[in-house]
Image (cartoon, grey):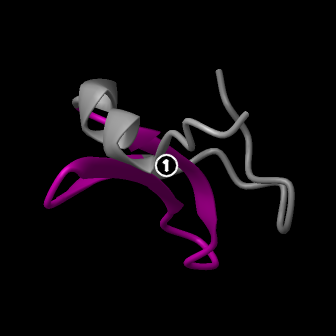
Amino acid sequence: MQQCKSCGGNSLVKVPEFEKELTVCLDCGEVVSIRFVNPSILKKYINPDY
């Protein structure tokens, strides 16, 4: 089980936000993780010079 690094709490919820899914600690409000639901949208940020 995932645990909050700020407070050590384990009451975490997943919150949808547009194209992202945030995992937030209910004890302190810290955002534990951010996950893109559709990672293919990130391809527009690829720099062809690299």
Q: Look at the picture and state if 42 lies above or below 4.
A: above
In the rendering, at what x and y percent does residue 12 appear?
Answer: 49, 48
Image side of residue 13 versus residue 41, left or right: right
Image side of residue 14 versus residue 8, left or right: left
The residue wearing badge 1 is 12
Q: Look at the picture and state if 7 lies above or below 41.
A: below
The amino acid sitting under disc 1 is Leu
Task: State the residue at coordinates (19%, 50%).
Answer: 19
Task: State the residue at coordinates (50%, 39%).
Answer: 46
Residue found at the far bottom of this picture: 28
Residue found at the far left of this picture: 18
* Front residue of this view, candidates 33 and 25: 33
Report which quarter residue 1 is drawn in.
Answer: top right
Report which quarter residue 50 is drawn in.
Answer: top right
* Front residue of this view, candidates 9 and 24: 24
In the rendering, at what x and y percent does residue 8 appear?
Answer: 83, 54
- Number of numbered callouts drawn: 1
Bounds of the magenta span? Answer: 13-37
Residue 7 shown in magenta: no
Task: State the residue at coordinates (73%, 40%).
Answer: 3
Q: Look at the picture and state if 31 lies above or below 42.
A: below
Residue 14 shown in magenta: yes
Q: Dominant secondary structure of the magenta stretch?
A: strand
In the rendering, at what x and y percent does residue 5 appear?
Answer: 86, 54
Task: State the residue at coordinates (37%, 40%).
Answer: 42
Residue found at the far top of this picture: 1
* Front residue of this view, candidates 34 and 48: 48
In the rendering, at what x and y percent does residue 7 appear?
Answer: 83, 67
**Secondary element at image label 1:** strand
**Structural crowding at the residue carrying mark 1, measured as other residues with C-alpha within 10 Å and reported as few (<14), some (14–19) or many (≥20):** many
